[in-house]
Image: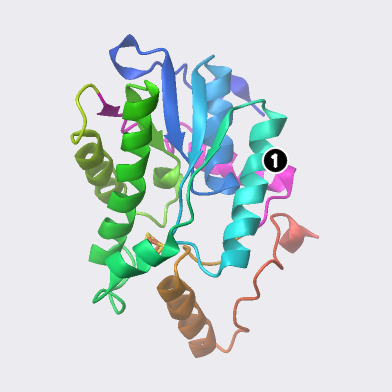
Amino acid sequence: MAESTRPMLQLPHQAHKLLLHSCCAPCSGEVMEALGASGIDYTIFFYNPNIHPQREYQIRKEENIRFAQKHRVPFVDADYDSDNWFARARGMEQEPERGIRCTMCFDMRFERTALHAFEQGFSIISSSLGISRWKNMQQINDCGKRAAARYPGITYWDYNWRKQGGSSRMIEISKRERFYQQEYCGCIYSLRDSNRHRKSQGRDIIRIGMTYYGDADE
Ligand code: SF4
């Protein structure tokens, strides 16, 4: 890993610690290593009640826990209140990815992250979500800032994790660690839409727990 290509990171407002919302190990791998390389003290906050089915949720979470343990980073395992997520998604089942259902989904995850930060004395929050090129970074940043604004003294750090090679290091780390390669964003509706797309191309539907980074290279 070419550490020299990574920028030296500094938290906003000269803060000394960060609460990092993580969606999964592949997205947070580069973010975690970049933070570590800059000597930033951070804690992982795993709150993703959108992920369906629960087996997929467990695989993503356990992999993230393993990687956090490897780097000796504290990991907060928050609730899997999927009933609450489904209640908030009602009426948005047919929305496309990057639409209003996703705004709700990011809002929900960041609201809990900001609450935990407020209760536990963190002043800065951020997320690994924005490193994925599938996501709308502006949408994510807006949701993060909205959640942070609910509590005094909390700032959402909208650092662009993709830049200066972040996106390629994300893939490099995922292959090095042989992370589980999830094949859809996370919710039941993204699973449905990904499978529809695959079927339209004559491809097999997604099989949970089967694909790992690096498999395709072998
Ligand atoms: S597509 Fe992804 S971001 Fe959008 S609602 Fe589903 S899990 Fe959340």
Query: Can residue 6 be seen by looking at this rendering?
Result: no
The number of callouts visible is 1
Q: Quadrant of residue 32?
A: top right
In this picture, is 122 found above or below 14? below
Give the residue type that dot 1 points to.
Arg
Magenta range is 154-181
Q: Residue at x 49, y 74 (%)?
A: 191
Q: Seen in the image, is 90 located left or right of residue 79?
A: left
Image quarter for ligand 1: bottom left
Question: Label 1's element?
Answer: helix
- In front of the other: 107 or 33: 107
The residue where tag 1 is placed is: 66
Quadrant, the N terminus? top right
Q: Seen in the image, is 110 located left or right of residue 73?
A: left
Residue 131, position as x, y percentages in the image: 44, 44
Residue 12, position as x, y percentages in the image: 31, 18
Q: Residue at x 65, y 71 (%)?
A: 208
Disc 1 residue: CB within 8 Å of ligand 1: no
Q: State yes or no: residue 81 in magenta.
A: no
